[in-house]
Amino acid sequence: MRERTVCGLDVGTSKTCAVIAEIAGDLPRAPAARILGVGRSKTTGVRRGVVRDIDETTRSIVQAVQDAERMAGTQVEAVWVGVAGEHVRYIPSPGVVAVNNEIRAADVERVIDVARAVVLPPDSEILHTLPQEFLVDRQRGISDPVGMTGTRLEVDVFIVTMSSSAATNLRKAVERAGYHVAGFVLEPLAASFATVTDDERELGVALVELGAGSSDVAIFEDGKFRHLATFGFAGAHVTSDIAQGLSVTQADAERLKERYGCAYQPLVDPAEMLELPGTPGQGTREAPREFLAHIIHQRLDEIMRNVGREIERAGFLGKLASGVVLTGGTAQLAGIVELAREVLAVPVRIGVPGQYLTGSLTDAVEQPRFSTATGLALYGMRQMAMGAAQSGGRQVSLDRVVGSVRRWLTDFF
C-alpha cells in the first residue's frame, strides 16, 4: 500500500496541514486520489514561508502527519512539501538549439537545459522549470514539438527559484520529524491542482492564495503558468488589526475572526453586538459586530487592490475570462467573495479541493485551508505515476528530466 500512498505537507505561518492519499484511477489519463487521512496542527515556528524555529516547526509537522497517519491507518516515509513566501521568485528565460530534421525528446531536453543556464541570485536555487511554449523554425504556439520537422528549436521557460537557506531549514525540520522530503513544490502551483479546472486554466484565471503570512497570486492562461507574485499582507495582519482595534490578545483576535468575522461590512447587521474577551481589569465589554467587520474589510480591501494592481501590471487586466479563484485559510471568511467582486470587477469563486478526489473522506478536505496540502498530494501522485519519485523516499529534484520529455509537458495536465 505504501507504494501507492502519497502525503502532501503544507507548513504555513499559522497552521500545518497534512493530507495522505492513495493513488486511484488510471494515471495520468484518468487521475484520481482517494483521501485516506487528514491532519492539522498549529504552527508557531514559521513566518512568511520561512522557518524561524526548527524545533517548533518540527513539532507541528510531527503532530499533523501523525494525526493523518492515524486516520489513514498507515505510515508514510516521504512527504511533498509546499514552498511559498517572499523569497520565491521567477525568471523568464529563453533557450535555442539547432536540430537535425526530426525533433526528438533529447532535443527538447537539450533546449530546456540551455534555458535553465541562467545566473541565479545569491542564496537561490531552482524550484521549477516550466516551459511556456516551443518554437520550431520561429513558428510559435507549439506545446509538444517531438516528432515535428525543423532545424531550429526554441523554448520560453518560466524558472521559479527559492531561497537555498529557507529550503535547507525546512528540509531539516521535516527530517527531524522523521520523514524524507520527496520534493519541494510551489504552493500556488500545488493549490491549482486541487482547485482550478482545466477550462479555467485555458481561458485565463488568477488563483489568489490567502494564507496567514503571505498572499500569492498565480495567473494561468492557455493552460500554462504565466505569472507569479507574493505580497507580505495576509490573514495574520487581519488578526493583528483586530487585536489592536478591539484591545484583545492575538489568540482572542483569531477566535473572533473565525467565529464572527465578515470580510464585507455591508453584510453585517449594525445592531448586532459581540461580547469581547478581556482581562479582569478590563471588565465586561461589548462591541458592534459591524466594527469587527469594518476592521477586516479595510485590510482585505487593501489586499484585493494589491491583487488587482498586480494583474494589471502583468498585462492580464480584462483578459482573465474565468476571473479569480480564492483559496487558503483566509478565503473561508464570510463575505470575501462579495468584497473581491466589488474590488476586482471580475467573476470570483472560492476554490476548494474536489476535482480528482474519490472516497468517503473527500469531505474532510473540502475547505480552502486544505487546498495546498491536497494539491501537494495530487502533485506527488502524478510524479509518482510518471516515475519521478524514487523508492525509499530519497530527495528528488523536481526539474530533473526522468524518462522522457513528457515530464516537462505534463506539469499542468
Image (spheres, helix red, strand yellow):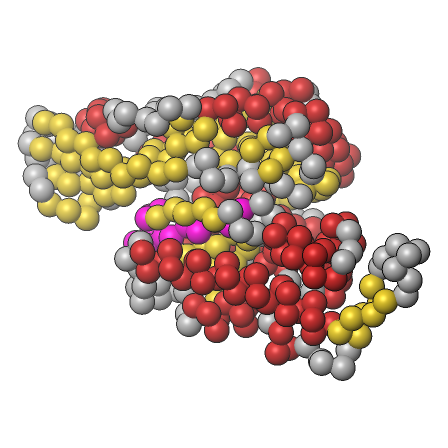
Quarter of the image for residue 181 reads top right
Q: Main secondary structure of the magenta part?
A: strand
Quarter of the image for residue 12 reads top right
Vertical comparison of 228 with 115: above or below: below
* In the image: residue 153, left or right of residue 255: left
* In the image: residue 317, left or right of residue 13: left
Indicate the quadrant containing the C terminus: top left, top right, bottom left or bottom right: top left
Residue 284: percent from left, percent from top: 90, 65
* In the image: residue 403, left or right of residue 293: left
* Residue visible at 72% across and 40% down in the picture: 42
Q: Is residue 39 magenta?
A: no
Residue 78: percent from left, percent from top: 60, 25
Please tell me which residue lies in front, 261 or 20. 261
Quarter of the image for residue 11 reads top right
Q: Is residue 367 visible?
A: no
Please tell me which residue lies in front, 120 or 11. 120
Residue bounds of the magenta highlight: 214-226
* Residue visible at 63% across and 59% down in the picture: 332
Vertical comparison of 397 with 82: above or below: above
Q: Is residue 216 magenta?
A: yes
Please tell me which residue lies in front, 344 or 225. 344
Residue 180: percent from left, percent from top: 59, 21
Residue 113: percent from left, percent from top: 25, 25
Please tell me which residue lies in front, 316 or 399. 316
Q: Is residue 243 visible?
A: yes
* Residue visible at 75% across and 33% down in the picture: 63
* Residue visible at 53% across and 70% down in the picture: 339
